[in-house]
Image (spheres, rainbow, N blue to C red):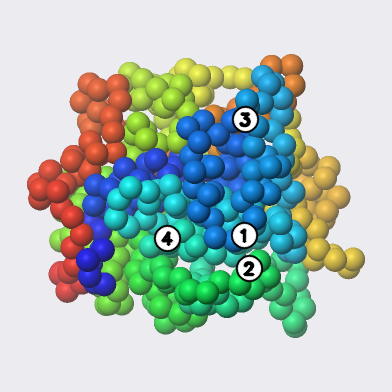
Amino acid sequence: MSAANEHPRIIQGGMGVAVSSWRLANAVSRAGQLGVVSGSMLDTVMVRRLQDGDPGGHVRRAAEHFPIPDAADRILTRYYRPRGRPAGTPYQLLPMYRRRVSAARERVTMLANFVEVWLAKEGHSGAVGINLLTKVQLPNLASLYGAMLAGVDYVLMGAGIPREIPAVLDAYAEHRPARLRFDAEGDKSDTPEYLELDPAEHWSPSRPLARPKFLGVISAASLAATLARKATGVVDGFIVEGPTAGGHNAPPRGQTRVNEQGEPVYGERDVVDLSDMRAIGVPFWLAGGMGTPEGLAYALSQGAAGIQVGTLFAYADESGIAEPIKQDVLHAVRSGGVSVKTDPRASPTGFPFKVVSVSEVVGAPRQERTRNCDLGYLRVAARTPTGFVYRCAAEPVDAFVDKGGDPAQTVGRQCLCNGLTATIGLAQPRGAGVEEPPLVTSGDALLSLDRFLDGRSSYSAADVLDYLLRSEGRGLFCAPNLGAS
């Protein structure tokens, strides 16, 4: 950016597990808008890319620049397979996160986030962001530090209340220790527990890092006001996300009602008062159903700095969705055979989750998935008389109950970790030619994507930007008009 008060018109959403890949973010950022990589499960994504032979050598090229001495070499020695995996060979798994993990495990997460951001920033001077979920608390400190080592410009976080993150960014800019309160179900102790990461335990840095701007993803103006007032440091802006957005949605406010399809019904209480957002006095972007020129014009008329767009970018050539799945969905859009359901039960987090179904491969009937939990990013901690246990409502029911979970919480739950990883072509083989089935998520805008496609079977990120910004030229970075009515 050329000035501290400049912001993008368009923020590309940080979607799925590597759907918002470095390739997509790089394409958007080099075009003058804000490309964002998804920070979810990047450590697993990186080691699977390495085990598949690192096509193109991208991981290894970026890893050469990782500043922590010897760390990248050790990780590459362990996971890189020059000829890839033999067909049907399962991926080697990383140890699942717990409150405390080894320094070596932290460095895998740091390197993975560094690599993704470094590649997204390669070859241009545009800004790059990373999107993380507050709810996925255990890897977040290592993820943030790794991204900052690569010079990430923006950090976007929602799916919870990221009140502590600004202070973490301040600390890591100076390589100081940082911590986050460790949330555990059933923890009634008067002494809080913390997740901690001290950069000095990994290396001896000599120069400070740039502190990225922090954007909180919110669904209510009251939450934005609370974050602006009570966060542990500066909040630089907000993404105002409505219930039509893809992935996880906030639950409806007030008493939950469902429609005939079992979807939660949103009402007037779920509409964010934009006059309240303007009154907070920091930039904000509108998200969820805003991915049209008209949506951008509306957002600007309401005093927003611009819009965040996910679904249009999710099916662009540069996105991480495996090409056969991408083409199945786009064909279904053109033929009218696609649906998007807001499933209140699918996600183990308890948040409603958008699930795509098409009349061909993605939504076709298939053998029921055998429950397992071997990635564990959505596990939550629970305190027991003997210590902490980690459980997920999508794991085997007996295991969940043995850890003190309510069996009713397991009904309808899907393994997002394995399903979303399969969507980007990194499915875990399960034997006898069986792989994890993909799980595709998109916003409601997918249902009207045919308007944008206009007969095309594929398109690029640049096509999306040209479409969104067609009424105002290239529409590069601009100062937000917070005083608009």
Residue highlighted by disc 2: 203
Label 3–label 4 contact, CB within 8 A: no
- Check disc 3: other Cα within 10 Å, few if <14, some if 14-19, many if 20+: few
Residue wearing tag 4: 152
Q: Quadrant of residue 83?
A: top right
Q: Earlier in the sequence, mark 1 or mark 4?
A: 1
Label disc, if present, on residue 90 of the rendered structure: none
Sequence-wise, the earlier of marks 2 and 1 is 1
Marks 1 and 4, how far apart at CA: 20 Å
196 lies left or right of 213: right
x then y, percent, for residue 132: 50, 57
- Crowding at dot 1, Cα within 10 Å, few <14 / some 14-19 / many 20+, comes out as few
* Mark 2–mark 3 CB contact (< 8 Å): no
The local secondary structure at tag 1 comes to loop
Identify the amino acid type marked 4.
Val
Task: Identify the residue position indicated by label 1 in the image.
Answer: 69
* Residue 106 % position (x, y): 66, 59
Decide which of 389, 260 is in the foreground and name it. Answer: 389
Q: Residue at x 71, y 42 (%)?
A: 78
Tags 2 and 1 in contact by the CB under 8 Å rule?
yes
Q: CA distance from mark 3 to mark 4?
A: 29 Å
Relative height, residue 311 to residue 229 (above, below): above
Between discs 2 and 3, the one toward the N terminus: 3
Q: Where's residue 161, x and y in %?
A: 51, 68
Instruction: Looking at the image, tell me whether mark 4 or mark 2 is earlier in sequence order.
Output: 4
Nearer mark to the viewer, of 3 and 4: 3
Q: Residue at x 62, y 60 (%)?
A: 69
Q: Is residue 132 left or right of residue 34?
A: right
Query: In terms of image quadrants, where is residue 276?
Result: bottom left
Residue kind at label 3, given as amino acid type: Pro
